Image: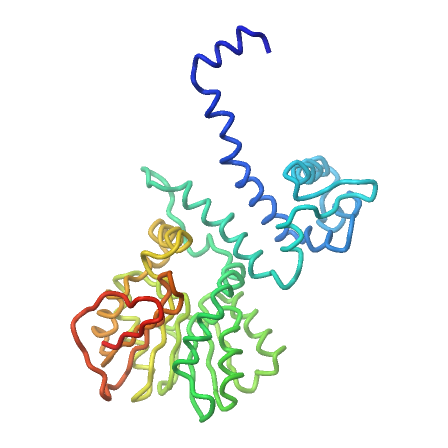
Amino acid sequence: MKPRTIAKLLRTGQVPVLLRLELLVRPLYRASFVASAASSGVLALLAGGPVPFDRIALHLGTAPDDHEMLRGWLELGVRLKELGRDHGGYRLRGWWSRKLAQPRHDVAAAALEEVVRYHQDVLAAAPPVTGRKRFSLADQDGELVARATRILEPFVQEAVDLVLPRGGSLRWLEVGCGEAAHVRHACARNPDLQVTAIDLQPQVAEIAARNVERWGLAARVAVRAGDVRTEPLEPGFDVITLHNLIYYFPLRERVALLERLRALLAPGGRLLITSGCRGGNLGLEVINLWFAASDAGGPLPDPADLRAQLLAAGFAGVELHNLKPGDAYYAFIGHNRAADVRVGRPAPAPRPGEVRSW
């Protein structure tokens, strides 16, 4: 570069910004590469050691015309220091690639892929402009979302334990069952439990049914695909659960949904809702933005608003449990019959570890 060109660039004042730009975009490139390598199976393929280019292409089913694109992608992984290259082929190098290649970190891999595929999209699509298409449920990969939300499994299990005794015959309805991981926990806790599990997306219901069969629970768990608002279900459930699901329903429809669920409960039955709420971590804020930018569902709930909706639907009392200290992840328990549950005025969300009954 000629001195005159350098001087011209310096006069524009752009050089410091351009030099620092890589610090902003490099983590984005790295996260996108690792997510793609995990979802395509390349990380798992390289977990056993170096693999030649031809074998990677064969594993991916890459056509000869696309070999240069594949090579360019692998070389980008080398530049990002997530992959290494030697005489044996390509190998894992970066910390993230080595960790996410392990099957036990599948949930973390799914969570990263969800961020790369959906969170980036909604951040790029906002703010709204004329003619921009809104997202829909078809824009989501139901299987991926089900895998990623398993990161919340310990908190959901804690909530399930609040309403499920360790014994005694009970009928349980799980709405939006995902991969049926929460159903499995409930069945392990109570050997007398009988479960109906329903999911709106047929492909997700199929995965749940296969898991239930594999876990030896088919005699106790019936899995079906359908919309709980219209699916013919026999009333009399002791507990109904909605985990990480309430925001898939538009705000204007939530009271009607809750009325429908209360009608399916037995006298004294309980509705358990677990959900991230507004005001939580950055990931929750982006999820809230995604649903605001879509035709599927509505915003994440506000604790006081959801409590008011439960009461409007006829529930006699509502408990609120903070499941994740330092964040806005709650369990709501709606009672179908008031015992000694006091119904009072709206109160602020509980502090970490605090339990509220209204």
In which quarter of the view is residue 271 placed?
Answer: bottom left
Answer above or below: position of 271 versus 29: below
Q: Nearer the viewer, residue 108 or 255?
A: 108
75 vs 320, left or right, is right
Q: Nearer the viewer, residue 267 or 33?
A: 33
Answer above or below: position of 86 versus 305: above
> Where residue 228 sits: x, y (%)?
38, 73
In which quarter of the view is residue 89 placed?
Answer: top right
Where's the C terminus, which quadrant? bottom left
Q: Nearer the viewer, residue 286 or 257?
A: 286
Number of callouts: 0
293 vs 185, left or right, is left
At 80% across and 45% down in the image, what residue appears? 52
At 30% across and 88% down in the image, what residue appears? 268
Residue placed furthest toward the right: 87
> Where residue 342 sits: x, y (%)?
20, 81
Residue placed furthest toward the top: 4
Residue placed furthest toward the bottom: 168
67 vs 326, left or right, is right
Where's the N terminus, which quadrant? top right
> Where residue 245 sits: x, y (%)?
39, 66
Q: Nearer the viewer, residue 300 or 30?
A: 30
Answer above or below: position of 25 versus 324: above
- What coloring was used for the rendering? rainbow
> Where residue 85 sits: x, y (%)?
76, 40
